Image (cartoon, rainbow, N blue to C red):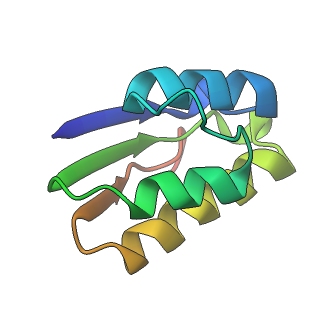
Amino acid sequence: MVLTVNGEHLLEPEQAHAYLRELFGFPAYYGNNLDALYDMLTQITEPSFIIFQPAASDRQSGFYRRLLRVFCDAAEDNPALQLQLEDEPGAE
């Protein structure tokens, strides 16, 4: 499975969790919080490659940075999950 996560959809918690639920096909009981996201990501058993496209640097919130940390931690803890972080817009 290859999925592209668009960081522009991850700036606010409610919007981010709705977007991720749909993108990943999370079940109805998904808890809409960062702990639940980590749980869902670490339970993925199918080899998965996630391309994480960042939000524009000037739009990144504290929530966005915490969410990105959850993706990084889950990829570290789940061998089936590979994460590719694309460069931030304007990065050289």
Between 61 and 75, the residue placed more toward the observer is 75
Q: How many marks?
A: 0
Residue 12 located left or right of residue 37? right
Between 84 and 91, the residue placed more toward the observer is 84
Q: Is residue 84 above or below residue 79?
A: above
Residue 14 located left or right of residue 45? right
User: Residue 34 at x, y = what percent?
Assistant: 70, 53
Q: Is residue 31 above or below residue 48?
A: above
Residue 79 located left or right of residue 90? left
Q: Is residue 72 above or below residue 52?
A: below
Residue 92 visible, this angle: no
Q: Residue at x 63, y 22 (%)?
A: 18
Which quarter of the image is occupied by the N terminus?
Answer: top left
| Location of residue 19 by image quarter | top right
Q: Residue at x 69, y 41 (%)?
A: 31
Q: Residue at x 78, y 26 (%)?
A: 14
Q: Is residue 47 above or below residue 2?
A: below
Between 18 and 86, the residue placed more toward the observer is 18
User: Residue 83 at x, y = what percent?
Assistant: 33, 59
Residue that extends furthest to the right in the rendered view of this protein: 62
User: Residue 25 at x, y = what percent?
Assistant: 39, 27
Q: Residue at x 40, y 78 (%)?
A: 76
| Location of residue 32 by image quarter | top right
Residue that extends furthest to the bottom in the rendered view of this protein: 77
Residue 38 located left or right of residue 61? left
Residue 55 visible, this angle: yes
User: Residue 84 at x, y = what percent?
Assistant: 32, 56
